[in-house]
Amino acid sequence: MNQGFIKVAAGTPQVTVADCKANTRAILEVIREMETQHAKLMVLPELCITGYTCQDLFLQRRLLDSAWESLLTIAEETADVDALIFVGLPMRMNGKLYNVAAALNHGNILGFVPKTHIPNYNEFYEQRHFASGADVWTDVTVGEESVPFASNLIFSCEGLPELTVGAEICEDLWVPLPPSVNLAQGGAHIIVNLSASDEMVGKDSYRRDLVKGQSARLVCGYIYATAGEGESSQDLVFGGQNLIAENGTMLAEAKRFQNTVIYGEIDVQRLADERRRLSTYPASDDADCQIVPFEVEVEETSLTRKFAPYPFVPSVKEERDMRCEEILNIQAMGLKKRMSHIHCQKAMVGLSGGLDSTLALLVIARTFQLMGLPSENIRCITMPCFGTTDRTYQNACKLSQCLGAALTEVNIKEAVNIHFRDIGHDDSVHDVTYENCQARERTQILMDMANQEGALLVGTGDLSELALGWATYNGDHMSMYGVNASVPKTLVRHLVRYYADTCGEKELEEVLLDILDTPVSPELLPPKDGKIAQKTEDLVGPYELHDFYLYYMLRAGFEPDKIYRIACCTFEGTYDKATILKWLKIFYRRFFAQQFKRSCLPDGPKVGSVALSPRGDLRMPSDASAEVWMEALEKLEV
C-alpha cells in the first residue's frame, strides 16, 4: 500500500430471497474469504441483505426491520476486519424507502449512500418501492452516532490520503450523468458500484465496456459487484458478473453464473498522478462532496495483477496487427506532409541492414505509394566500414532491390582513416572516437548527397535509443526528418515483422525475416570471424527491460523502487533481481545524462503515448541531476 497498490474485492453471496438472516451468514462468509486475501476494500451487491428480487415484500415492515437488524449484526461481526466494506439494503427514512449502500469500517457504520436514479422501464419497476436519494443530504442516528446519508459521500483513508472512495448503485452508472462524475471530481480515486443487473443476450459485453469506459473517463478505479445465483428467477436471471477496472483497463472479471469473489490491486498513486498530469481534470474543490474518514492498516500489498512485459506492444495478434498498421500510416503521413510542404520528390536513407534503417525505408516506400512517386526516387546509401559484416551488407542490397529503390555504395574506410590521421588518432585504439568518427562520416555523406539529389534525409533512430542516448551526437542522431523518433525498439521489431507478414512478396519477406534474426548492432568495431562483434544489448542492456523502464517512468510516473518491484514480478524467470537492478541504474544514469541529445532532435511524428520530443512531450533540462532517483536505487536490496 505504501506504493499505492490497494487490494480490492468484489463478491457475490448466495442470497436467499427475503431471508435476511441467511443472507447475513452468506455475506459474512464472503467477507471472511476476502479477509484471507487481505482485501482492504470489499464490495457486495445491491440489496444483498434482502435480495434484490423481493418485489412488493419491500413494503413489508418485517422485512425492513430484519434488514436493519442484519446490518447491525454485519457491522458488529466485522469489527475485527481491517477493511472498508460496502453492503446493500433497503432503508427507511423520513417516510420514504431508499435503496442504499452502507459503508462499514471496524464495526462502525460510516455512512449511507442512496441510489440516485431509480429505473422504471422494461423489467425494472423500482419506483414502485424506492425514492430517489438525489436531493437528500441528512444525518441518521445509529445508536449514539450521527451518520451521514447522502449521494455525495467520499470515504477517505486517514493513513493513506490517496485512498478515497465514492459509491453509486446500479442504474446510476447507466445514465448520461452518473453520480460518480461528481464523486471523481470531488477527489474519489475509486468508485464502487453495488448492482443487481440481470442477464440478457449481449448485455455482459455492454456492461464490461461501460465499466471500462467510466474508469477511463474518470481516471479512477471502478469496482462493480452485482447480484447472482440465489435471486428469484421468476422472470430474470442474474449472473454475478463482478468487474474491477482501472483507468480503462480491466484488472479482473468474474465468470458469470458462478457467484465468485474477484480481487485486484488498484494503484491509487498512479490515478492521482495521472489526474494531476491532465490539466483539464477538474480540481477537487469544483465538486460539492462530504468527506467521511475511515481507517485501514497500511501494509505491503502482495501483487497478483500482471504488468505487460512489452507495454508498447499489444499481446493479442489481432490488436498488434491493427496497431502496426496504424503506426506505419502515422509515420508515412508525417513524412508525406513534410515532403509535400517542401515540394520534395526524393528521399534518402542510410541503409545498414539493421532493424531501424529497414523500418525507415519501409515507411519511405509506403509514403511514396501514397504520394504516387516512383520508387527509384528513393535513394538508399550503404556505407560499409570497419565493422560491416557481409550479412548486413547483403541484406541492405537485397532490401533496396526488393523495394525498387536506387542503391549507392560509398565505402568510408579511406575517408575515416584520413580523418584519423588529421586528428592524430591511432586506428588501433577502438574507443569512442574510433566509433563516432564513422557515424559522423556517414552523416556527412548522407547530408551532402541529399543536397546533391535534392532529397530529404530520413532519420532512422528510434525512441529507445533516444532514451538511452545511444546515438552519436551530430552523427546518426541527426537527419532532416526522423520517422522512428517515437517508436520504441521492442515495437520496431513487430512493425518489420508485420510488414513481412503482409507484403505478399516472397523475396522481400525472406530478407525482412533475416534482418529480424540479426543481432542489434551499430557495427562500429571490426567483426570476429566474419560475425558481428559489437552487440548493443551487451553494452547498454536488454531493450525489453529499457522499454519497460521507460514506459513506467514517463507514462506512469513510477518511482525507481516501484519500477524495480514490478519489473521483478514481470520478468521473474527471465532476469534475476541483480540483473534488473543493474540495468535500471544504467537506464536512469543514461536517461539523465543524455538529455542534451534529445534537446535538439529533428522533427518526427509522435505515434504513441510516450515520446521524447523537446517541443512536445518532454521539457527537461539537459543538466538536471539524477541524484534523487539514484539515491532511491542505491537503497534497494537484491
Image (cartoon, helix red, strand yellow):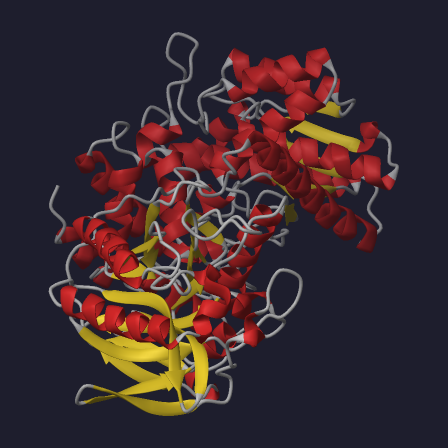
- In x, y percent, where is residue 167? 40, 71
| In the image: residue 297, left or right of residue 457 | left
The residue at the point 69 percent across, 46 percent down is 330
| In the image: residue 33, left or right of residue 470 | left
The residue at the point 38 percent across, 45 percent down is 259
| In the image: residue 130, left or right of residue 301 | right
Looking at the picture, tell me which residue is in the foreground, 344 or 174. 174
- In x, y percent, where is residue 441? 54, 36
The residue at the point 74 percent across, 31 percent down is 379
Residue 137 falls in which quadrant of the image? bottom left
Q: Is residue 375 above or below residue 594?
A: above
- In x, y percent, where is residue 476? 53, 40
- Position of the C terminus, as image quadrant, is top left
- Position of the N terminus, as image quadrant, is bottom left
Looking at the picture, tell me which residue is in the foreground, 605 or 446. 605
Total numbered circles: 0
Q: Residue furthest top?
A: 529
- In x, y percent, where is residue 370? 83, 39
Q: Is residue 160 visible?
A: no
Q: Is residue 629 above or below residue 372?
A: below
Q: Is residue 78 above or below residue 460?
A: below
Q: Is residue 473 visible?
A: yes
Residue 308 falls in which quadrant of the image? top left
Looking at the picture, tell me which residue is in the foreground, 396 or 543. 543
The residue at the point 39 percent across, 35 percent down is 544
